[in-house]
Image (spheres, helix red, strand yellow):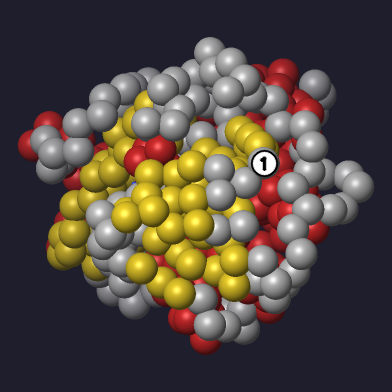
């Protein structure tokens, strides 16, 4: 597919101010382009999946249930995020202490199976390490004491994702980007259509996540739910996953004694609030991870849709005047660096676009327009 070379003073519209949209708008502004960023919702507390997300950058955890390319792009993220965060003067938002997986004694088979799947996906021994009970306690002293075995996945990281999205917006504004909240758009090559009418741009970049359904009929939303709780009774230094035959609960520490808890991946586009059953399951699994969570205050229940194509992989399409980037599924923070660098390499005219084999392939069931 041809690159879209644009002179550095072109006026570019970015549709969607979620994770991809903010990263792309920021990078284009630093290149000297004029950028107008549109979002259908609020910009400070956006309706984006990126705001609901837990912010884990976990290539090993995800590879056991994904394609090998997810691991490769995820490894790339582990080097690219620190660079971007340094450029944003926000290195403190990045924590790279690995991840811990534990299972109750009756579910230890889940850990064994996970390790087998991971070794298979990586085509050999994985870098994860089996831990015994004292090693688990040494790593995370506040966890319940009944975990006899765990897995430590080195290098994995997590981000303070909400602070990152806010920081990106501040930077976009500081660099002169035009930010249009509550402005749903339709995208076309070289123009966007809003309630106010058509507006011409040299290039349009569509990063609308599940809002891009009219453009990508094969795109679907996959429901995810999170609980935000707060307690000073427990400290965790890294994301912890509790393996269970029916779900994997994850707990991700955030600043100010907050924790984001999630587990669900439901094939549904229902955005209604969390069900009582999900809330009870998340709460009781959390309590078994550490009884210290019993007095935690529930601050928020989040529900959002992950944008996914049929192959659950991201895709970037280029045509004259329009680029689309979508399908990050449950891997937004893990795969955004690869997707954004691939997309920008096309605009900047760099010879090699990273991860072109995966990302430049058209989404399944979508023929060339
Ligand atoms: C519960 C949950 C937990 C998650 N946890 C993680 C995690 O730990 N790690 C990880 O890597 N990923 C995680 N993800 C996935 C990640 O959030 C998504 O992959 C990522 O946000 C997708 O980025 P995006 O920019 O494509 O879409 P989004 O972040 O959803 O942004 C799309 C934006 O487009 C806007 N928009 C929609 N329609 C229009 C329109 N017509 N006009 C203008 N704007 C429009 C929306 O308002 C939104 O702001 C999680 C997702 C969920 C739901």
Name the foreground residue: 316 vs 185.
185
Secondary structure category for the residue under label 1: loop
Residue 257 x, y percent position in the rendering = 33, 72
**Which residue in the structure is indicated by mark 1?**
320
Q: Residue at x 67, y 41 (%)?
A: 320
Q: Residue at x 25, y 55 (%)?
A: 195
Q: What number of labels is visible?
A: 1
Q: Residue furthest left?
A: 276
Q: Which residue lies furthest to the right in this view?
A: 351
User: Horizontally, is 22 left or right of 162 in the view?
Assistant: right
Q: Residue at x 58, y 34 (%)?
A: 314
Image quadrant where residue 347 sits? bottom right
Q: Residues within 10 Å of mark 1 (few under 14, many from 20)?
A: some
Task: Say whether residue 135 is visible.
Answer: no
Quarter of the C terminus within the rendering = top right
User: Horizontally, is 276 left or right of 168 in the view?
Assistant: left
Residue 277 x, y percent position in the rendering = 12, 32
Quarter of the N terminus within the rendering = top right
Residue 53 x, y percent position in the rendering = 39, 51
Q: Residue at x 60, y 66 (%)?
A: 11
Residue 30 x, y percent position in the rendering = 68, 75
Image quadrant where residue 306 sits? top left
């Amino acid at each position: 597919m041809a690159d879209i070379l644009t002179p550095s003073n072109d006026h570019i519209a970015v549709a969607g101010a979620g994770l991809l949209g903010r990263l792309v708008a920021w990078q284009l502004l630093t290149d000297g382009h004029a950028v107008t960023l549109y979002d259908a919702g609020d910009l400070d507390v956006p309706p984006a999946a990126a705001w609901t997300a837990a912010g884990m950058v976990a290539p090993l955890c995800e590879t056991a249930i994904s394609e090998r390319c997810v691991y490769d792009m995820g490894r790339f993220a582990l080097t690219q995020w620190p660079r971007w965060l340094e450029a944003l003067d926000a290195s403190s938002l990045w924590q790279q202490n690995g991840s811990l997986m534990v299972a109750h004694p009756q579910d230890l088979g889940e850990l064994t199976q996970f390790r087998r799947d991971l070794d298979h996906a990586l085509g050999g021994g994985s870098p994860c390490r089996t831990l015994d009970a004292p090693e688990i306690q040494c790593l995370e002293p506040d966890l319940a004491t009944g975990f006899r075995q765990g897995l430590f996945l080195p290098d994995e990281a997590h981000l303070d994702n909400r602070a990152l999205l806010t920081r990106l917006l501040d930077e976009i504004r500081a660099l002169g980007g035009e930010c249009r909240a509550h402005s749903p758009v339709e995208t076309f090559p070289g123009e966007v259509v809003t309630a106010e009418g058509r507006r011409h741009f040299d290039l349009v970049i569509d990063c609308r996540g599940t809002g891009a359904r009219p453009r990508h009929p094969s795109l679907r939303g996959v429901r995810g739910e999170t609980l935000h709780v707060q307690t000073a009774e427990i400290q965790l230094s890294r994301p912890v996953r509790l393996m269970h035959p029916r779900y994997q609960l994850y707990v991700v520490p955030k600043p100010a004694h907050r924790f984001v808890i999630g587990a669900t991946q439901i094939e549904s586009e229902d955005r209604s609030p969390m069900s009582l059953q999900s809330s009870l399951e998340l709460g009781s699994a959390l309590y078994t991870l550490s009884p210290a969570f019993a007095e935690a205050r529930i601050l928020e229940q989040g529900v959002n849709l992950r944008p996914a194509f049929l192959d659950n992989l991201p895709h970037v399409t280029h045509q004259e005047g329009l680029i689309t980037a979508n399908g990050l599924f449950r891997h937004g923070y893990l795969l955004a660096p690869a997707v954004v660098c691939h997309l920008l390499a096309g605009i900047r005219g760099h010879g090699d676009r990273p991860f072109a084999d995966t990302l430049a392939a058209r989404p399944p069931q979508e023929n060339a327009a």
